[in-house]
Image (cartoon, helix red, strand yellow):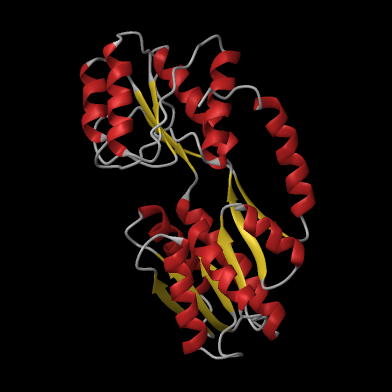
Amino acid sequence: MVFNHPFMQDILKSAIYTAEQAGYTVSAVDANWEASTQQQGLEDLISTGKMKALLVNPVDGDAIVPVIEEANKAGIPVVTVDAKANGGEIYAHAASDSIEIGKMAGEYAVERLKERNGSEKGKVIVINYPQVTTMAERVQGFNEVVSQYKEIEIIEKSVVELTPESAQALMDDLIMTYPEGSFDLVFAANGTTGVGANAVTESANRTDYEIIAVDDDPEFVEALQKDGAFKGMVVQDGIDIGAKGMELCIAAAEGKEAEEKIVATQLSLVTNENLKEYQAEYAKRQEIIASFGVDE
């Protein structure tokens, strides 16, 4: 796991809560976004001989493979959450369905275009970083929905790096290339690209197009409250990911067969209209798991 990120904290706290409710204790490793740190920490846990199962959110899908293979040799079942591993034997995987994320965003995009233009038509810019499989799958799902409408034009652009600065640079180029009134909507396939796109939009005071993104970044929440260009976010559920991942770990530790190899977790479309309801429900669920983190 990575400890210093709100979404990862939700996964971690929920997993620990679920384990302790079932009578298990959890040892956690802070990868700190470093594949080598994660690898060493998990190897140390394996070497204790006390692990009944491993719950892993890979920092790097390739780098984690030797650790998973080591766990396999030691007879320790491995469950992955959020990000996939690219090898080794996995008991099961719990995560959001990235294609479904894209489809949900695509359906909302079509709805917004119809409201703006009177019918399902317009020009949509999609911001991608296809090197990340989840983002490529989100764009795939988005395009599957939107491309059904012949009067909607999709223009796909990719950031050079997956950073807010790179997203801002791309969005700066886009608003120069496409002057006011020449496109209708931007779909940013993750939080980083969405933050960059929204920052440029607000700075340029552009209100002629709308933005839809993925994840519930605090900047998106603030933007929704302004009721400006930013219109919606498809939100993954870290609490659900942590709970379902740990439930799979417990089943694996108890020698049960996995009923499903891939377990899809909850998704929500959050807009200005349902933001308060979403925040209230999230706060209630946070209260339950609040005390189940680990010292950083």
Q: Residue at x 47, y 17 (%)?
A: 250
Q: Is residue 73 left or right of residue 240?
A: left
Q: Is residue 13 above or below residue 5?
A: above
Counting from the top left corner in percent of width and height, residue 233 is at 62, 58
Q: Is residue 128 above or below residue 24?
A: below
Q: Is residue 147 above or below residue 121?
A: above
The image quarter containing residue 68 is: top left
Q: Residue at x 61, y 52 (%)?
A: 216
Residue in the foreground of this view, choosing between 285 and 32? 32
Q: Residue at x 70, y 40 (%)?
A: 282
Q: How many marks?
A: 0
| Residue 195 visible, this angle | yes
Counting from the top left corner in percent of width and height, residue 191 is at 52, 57
Residue in the foreground of this view, choosing between 51 and 40? 40
Q: Quadrant of the N terminus?
A: top left
Q: Residue at x 42, y 63 (%)?
A: 140
Q: Is residue 181 left or right of residue 144?
A: right
Counting from the top left corner in percent of width and height, residue 194 is at 54, 64
Counting from the top left corner in percent of width and height, residue 34 is at 33, 39
| Residue 153 visible, this angle | no
Residue in the foreground of this view, choosing between 108 and 229? 229
Q: Is residue 139 left or right of residue 86?
A: right
Residue in the foreground of this view, choosing between 259 and 96? 96
Q: Is residue 60 left or right of residue 230?
A: left
